[in-house]
Image: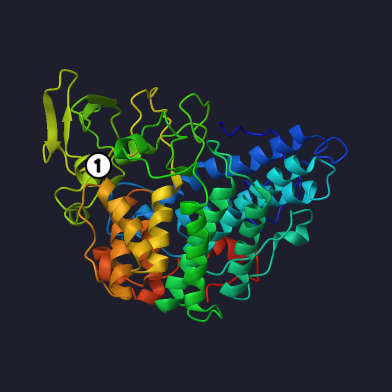
Amino acid sequence: MKTKIFSIIILFSLALSSCSLKEDPYGFYSEANFYKTPADAEAALMYAYNALTFIEYSRGIFYIGELASDICDVKADEGYGSQQLNNWAADANNETLTYYFKYCYIAINRSNAVIENIVNSTFEPVIKNKLLGEAHFLRAYSYLNLARVYGLVPIQRSMVKTISQTSPNMAKNMDELYDFINSDLKLADSFLEINQKVGRADKVAAQALLARSYLTIASSKESGVPKYAQMTKDVKTMYDSAAYYSRKVLYDQSHYSLDNDLQHIYNVDYPDGPEHIFIMSQDRTGLNEGNYSKIGMMFHPWVDGVPYYIKNADNTLTYTTNGWEVFKTTDAFYNTFFITDKRKTDLLVTKIYDATGKLAASVGDKFSYPFTRKYVDPKFVGQKSSARPYLIRFAEVALTFAESVGPTADGYLWINNVRTRAGLPNLTSGLGEAAFRDAVVKERGWELAFEGQRLYDLRRKAIVTKTDPRAIASGISEANAAFYPIPQMEIDLNTSLSNQ
């Protein structure tokens, strides 16, 4: 189901700022004529989901999660502060970081509005629980994104109704922030059923995000990452919690699973495939960017300014759009793949063809880097495509489980399931716990490449400056690499914030 824009102006237009808005309200919705029917409430929930598709939020997944890592470089003339991110020189005035912060809070405020107006409603319990569950999930999803990008952030627990509510206090510590996130996700888990819909979250999505959250805490504290190192949480308990929720996804349901066909995962006509636990809702039929996607163009190279064909694993051809080559695969990362890895041979493109199957160009001839085919839409319309960000995949949960349980029989089973699909032999047996977990993180790099996860894996393992050549060249410390600064605009508007 496509997320549609809900055309109600909320009490405060958070499109101008985030939790620290300092403007007079210019519109409102009236409880006398809204939230009175399930259809109204559903429309409000869709309005909350729609916040994820803002360009600044959806593209931030890649600008932030991939650029400052070993996987991608950026084209020389790209703006939006991407050069700073790419070279580990981003400060509190970075444009991408400023917008990402803002739109996370727009999503949070819209989720808060749904929660507050539905929690005491007289809707049927099944309807009420579903709406509340998804709203709690969305709020937690944005807060977890904020925590992984900026560290400590303000907690806006309720919908903004007055000017005084636009300057919430910073979370006291990471314990408070993650307790809030995980509480939301546990509520979502209790409210929701398994019900896969494109662009929507269900019970399995809540469990998968809980596993991601607990793994972040466990490995970050274990690695001595600042702010996480001071948490009161026990590392083993956090790993056990990550294992508990990821195990539920792997063993307690049968709807989601590993897709046996790597290329099928990224076929835009099958966004409801078995791998997709949570996927963004974007479609080439949308009227405005955000409703449709241009993500493929950001990864695809510019080759004479015209579309071209790429070859599939079965030697058939797929038509695809020319690109802007914003995100450029690094040679160093490309060379880390085993030669037989299908995630290299089947998902990274080094040759392009014309309609007859004749070779048109290859890396080094008209384009300079191997590019991912994860965002190919052969039915693109102009610059409009249905290539959606992959927010939570089953394979990520399998690797989260393996990392959490360590070198046990179950841990080896699931990392080997992922490796077998990629055409690789089983992981070396008999590894110690630390070596096994390091191997899982490497596997995540190959499996989740170009999906906006890499930076956060490097951060939680405190290996940014051991892995990313640009971070090494910048001279940045691992402590400084752990978080980006809170945007200066937000600090100026909310005196309770700081970059300590």
Q: Quadrant of the N terminus?
A: top right
User: Between 234 and 16, which is closer to the camera in this rendering?
Assistant: 234
Instruction: Please give the name of the residue rendered at 77% of the width and 51% of the height, measured from the top-left corner.
Output: 116
Taking 305 as reference, is 83 left or right?
A: right
Report the coloring of the rendering.
Answer: rainbow
Q: Residue furthest right?
A: 32
Type of residue at label 1? Phe
Q: Position of residue 91 (x, y in %)?
A: 44, 65
Taking 122 as reference, is 153 left or right?
A: left
Taking 307 as reference, is 25 left or right?
A: right
Q: Residue furthest top?
A: 356
The reply to whether residue 171 is visible in this rendering is yes
How many numbered marks does the figure carry?
1
Where 173 falls versus 399 (above or below)? below
The reply to whether residue 307 is visible in this rendering is no
Q: Quadrant of residue 456?
A: bottom left
Q: Quadrant of residue 346?
A: top left
Q: Position of residue 132 (x, y in %)?
A: 71, 48
Q: Quadrant of residue 481?
A: bottom left
Give the labeled residue for mark 1. 371
Q: Position of residue 64 (x, y in %)?
A: 41, 55
Q: Position of residue 234 (x, y in %)?
A: 52, 79
Where 309 falls versus 158 (above or below)? above
Instruction: Please give the name of the residue rendered at 40% of the width and 55% of the height, measured from the top-left corner.
Output: 398
Taking 273 as reference, is 252 left or right?
A: right
User: Between 233 and 485, which is closer to the camera in this rendering?
Assistant: 233
User: Between 227 and 209, which is closer to the camera in this rendering?
Assistant: 209
Q: Circle 1 — which element?
A: strand
